[in-house]
Every structure is written in structure tokens, then in C-alpha cells.
Amino acid sequence: MQYEFQIEGGNFSGAGESTSVIKKTLKQLGIDSTIIKRVVIALFEAEINVVAHAYNGKMIVEIFEDQIKMIVEDNGPGIENIELAMQEGYSTASEKVREMGFGAGMGLPNIKKNTDVLNIQSTPGVGTKLEMIVYI
Amino acid sequence: MNNNESYFYHALKVDAEICIGCTHCMQSCPTEAIRVRNGVAVIIENKCIDCGECFKVCPVKAIYIKQDDFSLIFNYKYRIALVPAVFIGQFPEEIRTSEIYAYLKKIGFTHIYEVEHGVGYMISFFNDYFKKYSDKNVFVSSFCPAVVRLIQVRFPGLVENIIHLKAPLDVSAIMITQRLTEAGIQKEDIGVFYITPCAAKIAAVKSPVENTKSIINGVINMDFLYNKVQKMLHTDKSNVEPINHSLTGRDVKWSLSGGEASNFGENAFAVDGLKNVIEFLEKLENDEIDTSGLIEMRVCDQSCAGGILNVNNRFVAVQRLLKRANYLDQKLDGRYCFVPEIGTNFYSRVAKQMEIDEIKPRPIDKLANNYKTALLMKNEIEKIKAKLPSIDCGACGSPNCAALAEDIVKGFASIDNCVFLDDECKSIKRINTEIWNNNKTNK
């Protein structure tokens, strides 16, 4: 089963809606609430990253018998130094984004903590692709 | 239709004789617990949270709230009315609180005890609880039973955030029972009756979340007693002897919006109204809300002053209660006339009785116990949903197209129930063309 959502850069107020759709589906499937919580946190953080940094993007969630696979892909500035971005507290978010309560530098570390597999591909000036897996 | 794993008492009932099957209730239900079958609304019991939305929207008053027979109080020698502060808010200001209580006595109660007497203890129990579970960040108050049930069925992941303590109502019932037994009265001679502003409180007394028997012997609907008192006010001209009452302003405000939260520091806040509560819980569950401390949550707009058994306008009722609170505060000048005796044997005994061991999640979204089966069913639901018109008209007897798709896969409904997909229905065909330009069904 596959779900796809578009993400609009800069639209903080619309963030989280697609996550709620996925959450409802996972509840219907009877998936454990701790796993649901991990998926929801990872998706929301990834979505906020796109909203805060990129122009636009999309989220694809596939549900399999043994895992939930999530891809969040964007057209944006890309990540210069992935290792640095993985550090807690490191952030390139603008002052404006920080004032809105985002950009604390916890996004990627938080995704890492809540997923079983995390692959990041990024080309500076082109965009970023996150591939995340949570096993059921 | 019910997969009855366990039985839950519900106070909301449908009178099949009166119901016209209009679908209003079905479409207002926050847990999609209503279907129309054989021309009448049917409540799916394990989905219902007793919030009363259906009661509010029913145009023919077919939904009623089952209460205990009033004559039941006379089975007891000592008949205690546990009166919530909002009861006073139902009457015009010129009728004094003490008069209202005196009339309740004339009606048949031997003792009047205000529910909010338990508030002083409650605050202390909450603070003990926060210390004990300091590893937790967010605490959702357990005061509103509809909120507790809503979390159990729709937000099972948040069950652990509910404060596992009973309500002021229980403290007060323990306190008055204790006082009377200390005076030498036999326990079996004491009947404690709660006057309720809503259906959820009845359900909570009849089948408590913790699966033990409640200390309350019966529940009487507030509108019923309001009518009785009003009748006496109009016909009974004999003098009533005023009854002393001794709440503080803080106690009176407890059941109003913010009245609970205001006791627990600047991080605590209140959410009221069903839609607001659902929206908030959705975000809290998604971890989108960065907060810590107590969250007071009530499904009724204006909290208990908006309870479905209230007679007076909720805003007028709130105003009267705020005035009363103000008066009491001035009269007492900051002194509390009732201070819980912390550290005494009584305190620890009540504290023990207030604990709720476990609040079980009762997820209603789950399609099947087996994940693979659920996955197959979900696939099927999505396929059917894609064929349905997304008008959510409710003519099929399910609250919306998504719910119909789910009902079909679960075997509770047939795709033929959808009027828009039935080729034989000529008038529907015409509506389909003229109103919907065919774009709802030609998919």
C-alpha cells in the first residue's frame, strides 16, 4: 500500500496533515502505538526539514508486511555536510524559522533515533532524499 | 455489529419509537459510533464515549439519557445529594444557593454535600502525583470522563498521559460517607446520589474506567432536579431553612474552563469543546506540541457549564458561578474554610482509594487482530473508497464514504447501499447529472 503527499516549502501551517492520514492508517492496521509514534515523529521532522529549507518536495509512504518505508524528497539547497547535520543542535535554519519554534538542530538526529534505517542522499544546490525504514 | 470484547455502560440511548433515522446524530458523532439501520439510529456500544453530541443535534429528541429512578433514594435512611457547583448556575441570581439546597432537602434528600468539597484534597493528590511521575512531561486531567474514553478509543497511545486518579466527586463521596459513619451511622443506610450535568459522568459511575464498583449509589439527571426545584419555587410558599455551604472561590471554579488548570502553575492550561480537544490530542499524539505540565481537557464548550443536561445558557451559568466564587473569596478573605489534613491516616487512605491501576487502551480503528489480515482489508477499503462519490451524504446508513467502505469490508454493509452507484435509481441519476455534474460517480 502506498501513499504520496506533496510538500510545499515555507508552508509551516500546513505541515502535519499528511502525517495524520498515515497515523490513522497505521491505527487501522493495529500497529503498536510505540511504532506509530516513531513513524509519526520521523515523518513530521522530515516534512518540517523540507518546509524550512527546500522549495518543494514529496513524501511517499509504503506499508509492507514487515516494514514501513518512507521517502521524503525535495528540490532545495541540499546538505553541505551530512555528518555535521547529524549532530544534535547543529542547524542552518534562518532566524525567521527559529522564531517560529523550529530549527533547533534536532531534526535529523531525531529521525535517526526513531527509525531503524536512515539513508541520506544530498546534492548541494539540487536537493535531498531521505529514505527511512521502521520495522514492524 | 458489536464486537463485544467487554461491556461498557452507556447512558445515551435511542428511543426507536421516536427516531426518524435522519442521520444528524450519525454525522455528528466524533467516534463514528452510529449507523442507521431499519430506519433508526443504532449506537455501536464499544465506540461510544458518551459525549452527548448526538443528544444535542437530534431534531426529534429521540436520544435520551437514562437515569436512575428517583424513588431509589428512598431505599436509604440517609440520602445524600452530591451537588456539583454548576447546578447553582442553572438558577437566576435572586435565588440563593442556600435556598436551592433547602429545596433539595424538601424533595427528599437528608444531606446536601457539594462535589467540590474534594477539590482541596484533589490539588494535593495531583501535586503528589506529579512528583511521583516526574519522568513524564504531559499530564492530561482525568476529570472529564468523555475525554478519558475518547483517548482510550481514538488516541490509545496517550492513555499513559492521563492522570491515573479519580475525580473530586469520588473524594467528596468518601468524605461524606466517612463523616456519617464516624457519627455512628451504618454504611448500608447511606445512599450517595450524584446530580449529573452530562451523560459521561453517569457512564463513569456505572462502569468506572478502573473496573471497580463506584462508591456512588445512584445518579440523577440535573434537568430532572432542576424541574423539581423550580416547581417548588413556584408552588411551595412555606419557609425553607437555609443550609450552610462552605466552598471557596477556587472550589466553585474547578468545573469551569481553566478552573482546574489555574491551580498548577504557568505551564498548565485548559482545552474545552469537543472539536478543540480532538484537534489538540491529534497534535499531541503526533508530538507536534511542545508542552509540559497539566492539561485540563473537557469535551463540553465552557466545560461543565456546557453539559448537555444543563438548562441555563452556559455563559450565563458561568457568570453566576464566577460571581459566587468572587463573593466566597471576599467573604473568606483568603482563608480556606476547608483545608485537607495532609499526612493524616485519612489522607493516605483516601489517596489510596483515589488511585486508578490501569486505564486500558480500547482502539476502535483496528480492522483486525492479525496484521496481515488488516493490511488486506485496508487495501480493499481503499479500492472501494475510490469508487464511492465522497459526498458523505449518509444515505447509506454509514456516517461517510470512508466509513461505508470500512463497513462493507467488515461485512456490516453492502456497496448497494450507495444510492449514487445504483443504476436503477432514475431520480438519483437525474440528481447525479443536474446537481453533481456526473463528476461524483464517473470515476
Image (tube, grey):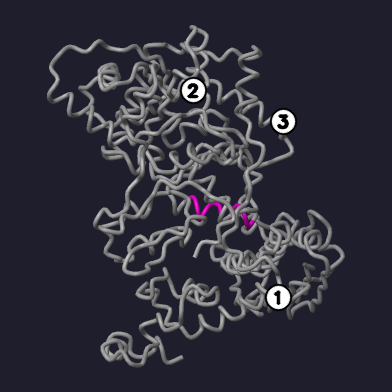
Residue A97 x %, y %: 63, 59
Numbered range of the magenta stretch: B277-286
Q: Amino acid type of disc 2?
A: Ser
Which residue is under mark 2?
Answer: B172
Residue sticking out furthest to the top: B183
Residue drawn 24% across the image and 57% down it: B60
Residue B360 x %, y %: 63, 47
Q: Amino acid type of disc 1?
A: Ile
Chain under disc 2: B
Q: Secondary structure at mark 2?
A: helix
Is B344 in front, or is B111? B111
Is the Cβ of the residue at disc 1 closer than 8 Å to that at disc 3? Answer: no
Residue B62 x %, y %: 28, 55
Looking at the rendered image, the disc whose residue lies closer to the viewer, 2 or 3, is 2
B199 to B55, vertically: above or below: above
Is B389 in front, or is B130? B389
Q: Within 10 Å of the Cα at label 2, are there few (<14), some (14-19), or many (20+) other Cα atoms? A: many
Q: Amino acid type of disc 3?
A: Lys
Chain under disc 3: B
Which residue is under mark 3?
Answer: B132
Residue drawn 42% across the image and 28% down it: B253
